[in-house]
């Protein structure tokens, strides 16, 4: 049985809001209403203090929202570090929300971890994919964040329209104080967004997809994250799941391989909300018991949580440069 003392990591969707309109984002695939939610400071304090004190890392990535849209983010990060100075914090953002002062205040809590800023090109190409974001504002916010001691990574999703800018973007990342610059291919393309012309860029993606298909049809067992890594996923509406995929599949239902999950989540949704139900009771409840048992042989779980997938996924990074 999963208990609080087993939990060493959290992946938290601190907000479901996002100003960007990226074409391939999961936000556009929703089949269930999922409004604007936020884990506020008072909500966050409902998590056991003993849990916060034992955590090794917390990721503020999430499925649908951007951490910078949460008005309490700085306060929450400070509260966490006050209880556990050794926990490593990480996050993902488009960097186009809030001002330089806000990012400067957040930065000290990310000195030991990292904040990934998604910047897909330079001033003339970035917003072609990251629709609704402001490149110049993002650069200023990155500089404010790194200037205040935060560790920033620049993630560049490559398309044909921006692949010629990789070297210049890498130089820009270094000048803004980023500690890492890395390039990955898009998971999707259409008539508007074409694959990079460089053959090795999309060959890697094709190999990775082929691996996923083989893993899904294999007889290997999935290594479920709460049991193997001691991690949980907290959605911004307060619901608690074994992983981000469990929450994502319930809201989007975009993969038939994971069809056991939506009715299971629907059945127990009201009883798995940490804002209204103690987290320990949620972990002891039927939702986690059933989903952990069914995930062992599920094809989607085998594909996403195969022990070798992390190793293979590293090969998907096309460019990976660290700066001193």
Image (cartoon, grey):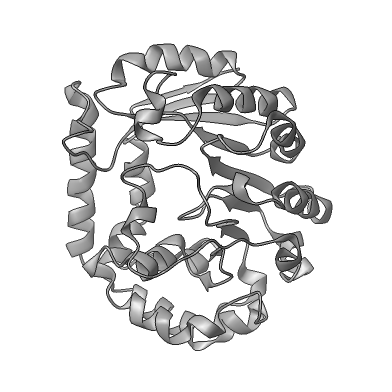
Residue 306 in view (yes/no): no
Q: Residue at x 36, y 59 (%)?
A: 305
- Expressed as whole percent of the image width and height from the top left, the position of residue 281 reads 63, 84
Q: Quarter of the image holding residue 296? A: bottom left
- Expressed as whole percent of the image width and height from the top left, the position of residue 90 reads 60, 44
- Expressed as whole percent of the image width and height from the top left, the position of residue 311 reads 36, 43
Asked if 38 appears above or below 275 in the picture, the reply is above
Q: Residue at x 18, y 55 (%)?
A: 213
- Expressed as whole percent of the image width and height from the top left, the position of residue 121 reads 40, 22
Horizontal relation, residue 204 to residue 148: left or right: left
Asked if 38 appears above or below 279 in the picture, the reply is above
Residue 190 in view (yes/no): yes
Q: Quarter of the image holding residue 49? A: bottom right
Is residue 2 or residue 31 the one in the foreground? 31
Extreme front residue here? 132
Asked if 295 appears above or below 143 in the picture, the reply is below
Is residue 298 or residue 248 the one in the foreground? 248
Asked if 194 appears above or below 65 in the picture, the reply is above
Is residue 157 or residue 283 the one in the foreground? 157
Q: Residue at x 24, y 27 (%)?
A: 201
Is residue 289 or residue 229 the one in the foreground? 289
Horizontal relation, residue 125 to residue 199: left or right: right
> Is the C terminus in the top left, top right, bottom left or bottom right quadrant?
top right
Q: Residue at x 67, y 46 (%)?
A: 88
Horizontal relation, residue 290 to residue 279: left or right: left
> Is the N terminus in the top left, top right, bottom left or bottom right quadrant?
bottom right
């Amino acid at each position: 049985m999963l208990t609080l003392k087993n939990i060493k990591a959290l992946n938290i969707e601190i907000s479901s809001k996002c100003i960007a309109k990226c074409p391939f984002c999961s936000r556009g695939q929703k089949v269930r209403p999922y409004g604007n939610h936020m884990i506020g400071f008072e909500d966050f304090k409902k998590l056991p203090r003993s849990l916060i004190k034992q955590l090794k890392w917390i990721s503020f990535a999430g499925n649908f929202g951007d951490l910078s849209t949460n008005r309490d983010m700085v306060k929450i990060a400070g509260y966490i570090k006050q209880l556990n100075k050794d926990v490593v914090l990480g996050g993902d953002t488009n960097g186009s929300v809030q001002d330089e002062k806000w990012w400067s205040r957040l930065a000290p809590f990310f000195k030991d971890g990292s904040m990934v800023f998604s910047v897909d090109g330079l001033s003339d190409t970035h917003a072609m994919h990251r629709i609704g974001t402001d490149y110049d504002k993002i650069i200023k916010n990155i500089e404010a964040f790194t200037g205040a001691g935060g560790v920033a990574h620049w993630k560049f999703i490559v398309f044909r329209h921006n692949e010629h800018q990789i070297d210049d973007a890498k130089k820009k990342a270094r000048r803004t104080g980023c500690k890492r610059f890395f390039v990955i291919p898009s998971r999707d393309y259409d008539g508007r967004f074409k694959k990079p012309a460089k053959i090795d860029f999309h060959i890697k993606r094709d190999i990775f997809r082929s691996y996923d298909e083989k893993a899904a049809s294999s007889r290997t067992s999935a290594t479920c994250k709460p049991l193997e890594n001691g991690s949980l996923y907290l959605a911004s509406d307060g619901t608690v799941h074994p992983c981000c995929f469990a929450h994502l599949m319930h809201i989007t239902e975009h993969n038939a391989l994971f069809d056991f999950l939506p009715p299971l989540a629907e059945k127990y949704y009201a009883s798995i909300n940490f804002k209204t139900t103690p987290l320990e009771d949620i972990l002891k409840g039927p939702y986690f018991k059933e989903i952990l048992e069914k995930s062992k042989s599920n094809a989607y779980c085998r594909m996403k949580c195969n022990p070798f997938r992390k190793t293979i996924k590293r090969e998907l990074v096309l460019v990976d440069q660290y700066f001193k």
